[in-house]
Image (cartoon, grey):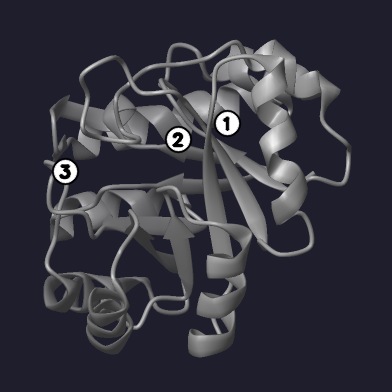
Amino acid sequence: MALDIKICGLKTDKALAAALAGGASHVGFILFAKSPRYVEPAEAGRLREAAIGKAKAVAVTVDASDAFLNEIVGKMRPDMLQLHGSETPERVVELKARYGLPVMKALSVSEAVDLKRIKPFIGVADRFLFDAKPPKGSELPGGNGVAFDWRILAGLDAGVDYMLSGGINAANIGDALRLANPSGLDISSGVESAPGVKDPALIEQFFRAVRAARDNRAA
C-alpha cells in the first residue's frame, strides 16, 4: 500500500526542501493565527511554488471565515483544504462547491466512540485526519505532540481513507504503522527543535525511520 506523508506547519525554504527531498506527498501550511506555525497566505503561496509537481500543498484552517478562505485560496493556491475546527458536513459541502478543491476533515480522537463522529462526513470529506484531542488549556486543535491509542483505529471500516496524526516521531513510527496501518501520516511537532521550528535534520531522520519501519514489516 502506498503511504502518503504530510509534513505540516512548514514556514521556511530549508524545511520545505527537506520535506520534498525526503519524499513528502503533501506539505502543509498553517493558516491559523494562534499557532506558532502560522504563515501569511501570501508567504504560503510563495513557499508552495517549490512543491509544484512534487507534493500537494495543503492549507490548514480552523473555522476560517469566508473572507479569510477567499484570501487563502487566492494567494496560496492550495491543492487541498484541511479543516481542523468544528466545521459541519454542510460546511464541507459548501467549501468544496465554492473552491473546487478536495477537503480533508480533521477529527480529534481519544477513545473508540469518537470515531462515530466520522459518519456524517463519509462521502462528503475526501479524506480524514485523526489527531489526538488537545491537552486541557491548549488553544491549538492540533500540533500538540500528543498521541492517542492507535489500536482503536482497528475498528474502522476498511474503506475509510485517513491520515494519522498526533505525537508521531522517528522513535514511534514503527508502532504507528503496525497498530494503525494508515494510508497516510501527518507529522508536525515530531520534526521540530522548538514549537514552530522545523529541523531539516529531524525531517530527514523521520523519513529514514519510515523507510526502516516499512522494510522491517516487509521482511
Q: Which is more toward the observer, 141 or 54? A: 141
Q: Is residue 38 above or below residue 142?
A: below
Cα distance between the residues tagged 2 and 1 = 6 Å
Q: Secondary structure at mark 3?
A: loop
Query: Does residue 115 appear to the left or right of 15 in the view shown?
Result: right
Q: Which is more toward the observer, 108 or 9? A: 108
Query: Does residue 12 appear to the left or right of 208 in the view shown?
Result: left
Residue 108 appears at what percent x and percent y?
A: 50, 31
Residue 172 appears at what percent x and percent y?
A: 50, 12
How would you rate the neighbour count of disc 3 (Cα within 10 Å): few for under 14, some for 14-19, many for 20 or more?
A: some
Q: Which residue does the numbered mark 2 point to in the structure image?
A: 207
Query: Does residue 37 appear to the left or right of 154 in the view shown?
Result: left
User: Does label 2 or label 3 sit earlier along the sequence?
Assistant: 3
How would you rate the neighbour count of disc 1 (Cα within 10 Å): few for under 14, some for 14-19, many for 20 or more?
A: few
Q: Picture quarter containing residue 111?
A: top right
Between disc 1 and disc 3, the foreground one is: 3
Between disc 2 and disc 3, the foreground one is: 3
Question: Label 1 amino acid?
Answer: Arg
Residue sitting at x 26%, y 56%? 16
Task: Check the picture and name the quadrant holding the C terminus.
Answer: top right
Question: Label 3 amino acid?
Answer: Ser
Asked whether disc 2 touches disc 1, contact meaning CB atoms under 8 Å apart, the reply is: yes
User: Does label 1 or label 3 sit earlier along the sequence?
Assistant: 3
Question: Label 2 amino acid?
Answer: Phe
Residue sitting at x 55%, y 57%? 88
Q: Is residue 82 above or below residue 171?
A: below
Q: Which is more toward the observer, 167 or 52? A: 167
Q: Which mark is residue 35?
A: 3
